[in-house]
Image (cartoon, grey):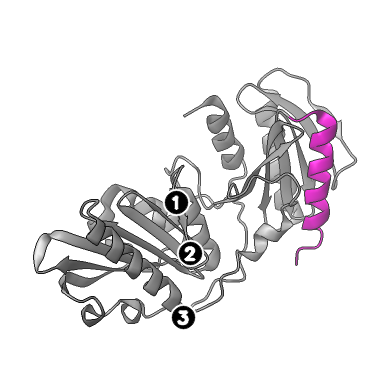
């Protein structure tokens, strides 16, 4: 992990107790088994195992050490099934359907697991395949599939399964509404992230939204977190100020954005600005000039003012 990534971890951890509230959260579950393709629709294939269901209390039995990541993003239920070609257990495609409880949770998990260089696919809201592994999300459902190997027949059926399941998931294909607060100019495509917990995954801490920007050849990272109240936001900003003061660099006041904040210099993040805007804490850091950082952050704060 780089110094910048470690600094980013600290930044979100200091916003402990904060969270981006999602209006998409629903109490009613989704019948995942109804989304599974029938073996009769896959000529020459049968179900070799499953469907098996997992709930939050027993998810670790299936994915063991990775379970905390899924739980922090709101995991509700998993259905796992393995399709076999010609009854051969070594010629299989596995399919996992995750009900993540909300659109924001499904999006956050998908983007957190998306590898670099994955080939985009027209599945659900977003989809991709990287070698033998495929993934997609739509509404509150995250879909993951994997072929036993890279034989063309296995990959072809995997793609068909992913496409069919993604099209059957109810709901729209819009991104989470909370991302609309991010300014569009200069934003790096697919860089938006929803951080549901501390990036090290050791404790449950609601997080925030971040995105990368490139402006005039310089890079920056923009972020914001919803603390739920102005008092909680003020407390989080004060904690962040205390943390940044440890580096011994001067902390300059920035009264012109939101309800005020400060400039900082961090050995991992570079220079940056953090401010409070109502119930939000927002900030920017990276290689952008101070004036460019201020302009970008001002756009974000203005858009946060339009949030409900």
Quadrant for the C terminus, please: bottom right
Q: Nearer the viewer, mark 3 or mark 2?
A: 2
Spot the residue most to the front.
Answer: 152
Q: Which residue is mark 1?
A: 119
Q: Which mark is residue 122?
A: 2
- For mark 3, give the secondary structure: loop
Nearer to me, 220 or 254: 220
Left or right of residue 163, residue 126 in this image: right
Nearer to me, 151 or 255: 151
Q: Which of disc 3 and disc 1 is earlier in sequence?
A: 3
Q: Which of disc 2 and disc 3 is earlier in sequence?
A: 3
- Is any atom of residue 201 visible in this view? yes
Above/below status of 54 relative to 33:
above
Badge 1 local density, few (<14 within 10 Å), some, or many (20+)? few
Above/below status of 223 relative to 8:
below
Badge 2 local density, few (<14 within 10 Å), some, or many (20+)? few
Above/below status of 213 relative to 155:
above
Nearer to me, 148 or 255: 148
Q: How far is disc 1 from disc 3 in space, using C-alphas?
A: 33 Å
Q: Which residues are magenta?
A: 288-308
Q: Nearer the viewer, mark 1 or mark 3?
A: 1
Location of residue 253 in the rendering, given as x and y in whole percent from the top left corner: 85, 32
**Point 83% across, 37% down: residue:** 294
Report if residue 304 lies within the magenta region: yes
Q: Which mark is residue 96?
A: none
Report if residue 179 lies within the magenta region: no
Q: Quadrant of residue 21?
A: bottom right
**Point 79% across, 42% down: residue:** 296
Q: Which residue is mark 3?
A: 28
- For mark 2, give the secondary structure: loop
Left or right of residue 54, residue 71 in this image: right
């Amino acid at each position: 992990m780089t110094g910048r990534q470690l600094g980013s971890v600290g930044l979100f951890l200091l916003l402990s107790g904060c969270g981006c509230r999602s209006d998409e959260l629903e109490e009613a579950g989704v019948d995942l088994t109804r989304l599974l393709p029938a073996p009769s629709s896959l000529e020459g294939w049968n179900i070799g195992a499953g469907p098996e269901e997992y709930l939050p209390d027993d998810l670790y039995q299936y994915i063991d050490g990775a379970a905390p990541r899924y739980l922090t993003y709101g995991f509700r239920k998993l259905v796992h099934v393995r399709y076999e070609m010609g009854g051969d257990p070594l010629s299989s495609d596995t399919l996992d359907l995750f009900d993540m409880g909300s659109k924001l949770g499904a999006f956050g998990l998908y983007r957190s697991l998306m590898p670099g260089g994955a080939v985009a696919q027209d599945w659900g809201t977003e989809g991709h395949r990287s070698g033998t592994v495929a993934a997609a999300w739509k509404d509150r459902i995250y879909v993951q599939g994997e072929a036993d190997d890279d034989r063309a027949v296995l990959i072809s059926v995997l793609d068909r399964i992913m496409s069919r399941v993604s099209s059957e998931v109810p709901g729209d294909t819009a991104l989470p509404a909370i991302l609309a607060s991010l300014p569009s100019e200069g934003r790096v495509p697919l860089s938006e992230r929803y951080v549901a917990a501390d990036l090290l995954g050791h404790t449950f801490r609601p997080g925030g939204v971040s995105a990368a920007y490139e402006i005039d050849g310089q890079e920056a990272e923009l972020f914001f977190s919803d603390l739920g109240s102005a008092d909680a936001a003020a407390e989080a900003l004060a904690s962040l100020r205390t943390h940044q003061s440890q580096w011994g660099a001067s902390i300059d006041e920035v009264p012109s954005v939101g309800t005020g904040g400060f400039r900082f210099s961090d050995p991992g993040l570079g220079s940056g600005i953090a401010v409070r805007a109502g119930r939000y804490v927002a900030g920017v850091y990276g290689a952008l000039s101070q004036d460019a950082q201020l302009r970008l952050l001002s756009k974000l704060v203005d858009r946060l003012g339009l949030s409900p």
